[in-house]
Image (cartoon, rainbow, N blue to C red):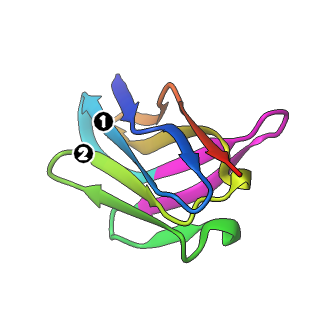
């Protein structure tokens, strides 16, 4: 199994910054993609940003130029630096990691979620 532990959420005023981090542990053989998803109240969970093993990144249009995703392959961690936060960025942020376990089974793991609240 692969476990994820997230940290870094909180309450911030509009225009402020927060940094989310996620650490993966367990029977990891390889990691293909690490990403962050956001779920606002009453809405579906949507992709915010993802970074693949080669370093390529994809961002939701709403966060381009404000958020930056990065990963540390040696530590199996992924971070999301969020700048110029807006009230519409409010939601629960979930870390997601996809890869292959030792033994060959593929995994698609989710963190427990961390709340980000941006006040106007």
Q: Mark on residue 57?
A: none
Q: In the rendered image, which residue does mark 1 sit on?
A: 24
Seen at 74% across and 53% down, the residue is 88
Q: Tell me whether the residue at label 2 lies in contact with that at label 1, contact meaning CB atoms closer than 8 angstroms.
A: yes
Quarter of the image containing the N terminus? top left
Magenta stretch: give its range: 35-51
Where is mark 2, residue-wise?
76
Question: How many other residues sit within 10 Å of disc 1, few (<14), some (14-19) or many (≥20)?
Answer: many
**Which x, y percent locates residue 94?**
54, 38
Indicate the secondary structure of the residue bearing disc 2: loop
Residue farthest toward the bottom in the current orientation of the protein: 65
User: Residue at coordinates 23% horizontally, 55% vertically from top-left?
Assistant: 72
In the rendered structure, the answer to whether residue 30 lies left or right of residue 96 reads left
- Determine whether, in the image, residue 104 is placed left or right of residue 56: left
Q: Decide if residue 102 is in sight here.
A: no
Residue at the extreme left: 74
User: Where is 61 relative to 36, above or below?
Assistant: below
């Amino acid at each position: 199994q692969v476990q994820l532990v997230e940290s870094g959420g909180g309450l911030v005023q509009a225009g402020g910054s927060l940094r989310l981090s996620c650490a993966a542990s367990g029977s990891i053989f390889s990691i293909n993609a690490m990403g962050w998803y956001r779920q606002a109240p009453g809405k579906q969970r949507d992709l915010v940003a993802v970074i693949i093993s080669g370093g390529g990144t994809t961002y939701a249009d709403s966060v381009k130029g404000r958020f930056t995703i990065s990963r540390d392959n040696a530590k199996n961690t992924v971070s999301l630096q969020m700048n110029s936060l807006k009230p519409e960025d409010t939601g629960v942020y979930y870390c997601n990691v996809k890869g292959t376990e030792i033994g060959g089974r593929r995994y698609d793991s989710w963190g427990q979620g961390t709340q980000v609240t941006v006040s106007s």
